[in-house]
Amino acid sequence: MDRLKASIRDVPDFPKEGIVFKDITPILANGQLFRLAVTIFAERYQRKSVEKIVAIDARGFIFGGALAHYLGIGLTVVRKKGKLPFTSHQEEYQLEYGQGVLEMHVDAVEKRQRVVIIDDLLATGGTAEAAARLVEKCGGEIVELAFLVELGFLKGREKLTKYPVFSAITY
Ligand code: AMP
């Protein structure tokens, strides 16, 4: 875990002044570290009867794709507005440095399907909360919200008290 934390790069004032962006691309660029990050999630969820991974645009896709592949289960993408081709549910959200609309295909999660939602980082929790609402609109059951990194001082967990939350690395 220390090796993962040590390789996350702080980028000050990106994408806006005052935001310290946690750049996880050095983890992706190192095969051992990328595998370690995915293995943390894989070991946590392999015996929890998870049926679908819901990954959040865009860095969530990287970890979510690898995790779904490892577990041998399906992957659903939650995308920023205007990217999905089929009929979609929509949810507005606010995040640490902006706001927008997230979308998910109406048939991407089945009723009572056991879902893990994954993203690279939990900041204020607005993005993950919107993704959870999209899953609930389809009737899915949220097993857990999973993040590689959590910015604890932004108290995103307080917005997500309805759901179990896991993060591998906390600041
Ligand atoms: P939030 O909705 O505030 O929890 O923001 C989480 C989403 O925004 C995730 O998809 C993150 O990738 C991204 N994000 C927010 N703040 C940061 C940050 N300081 N460093 C890297 N990514 C961030």
Image: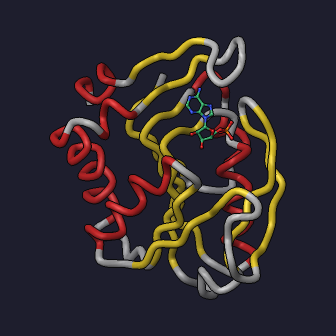
Task: Say which quarter of the image contains residue 46.
Answer: bottom left
Q: Is 77 positioned to the left or the right of 132 in the image? A: left
Q: Position of residue 102 (x, y in %)?
A: 74, 58
At x 66%, y 30%, the residue is 155
Task: Say which quarter of the image contains residue 109.
Answer: bottom right
Q: Position of residue 3 (x, y in %)?
A: 23, 25
Q: Position of residue 160 (x, y in %)?
A: 68, 48
At x 80%, y 55%, the residue is 101
Q: Position of residue 98 (x, y in %)?
A: 78, 35
Q: Quadrant of the image for the N terminus?
A: top left
- When the figure is inspected, residue 168 is found, relative to residue 137, above or below; the finding is above
At x 75%, y 64%, the residue is 82
Q: Identify which residue, 164 or 31, lies in the foreground.
A: 31
The residue most toward the left is: 32
Q: Identify which residue, 34 or 118, lies in the foreground.
A: 34
Q: How is the image coloured?
A: secondary structure
Q: Ligand 1 is in which quadrant of the figure?
A: top right
* Number of disc labels: 0
- When the figure is inspected, residue 93 is found, relative to residue 105, above or below; the finding is above
At x 73%, y 38%, the residue is 95
- When the figure is inspected, residue 157 is found, relative to residue 7, above or below; the finding is below
Q: Is 26 positioned to the left or the right of 33 in the image? A: right
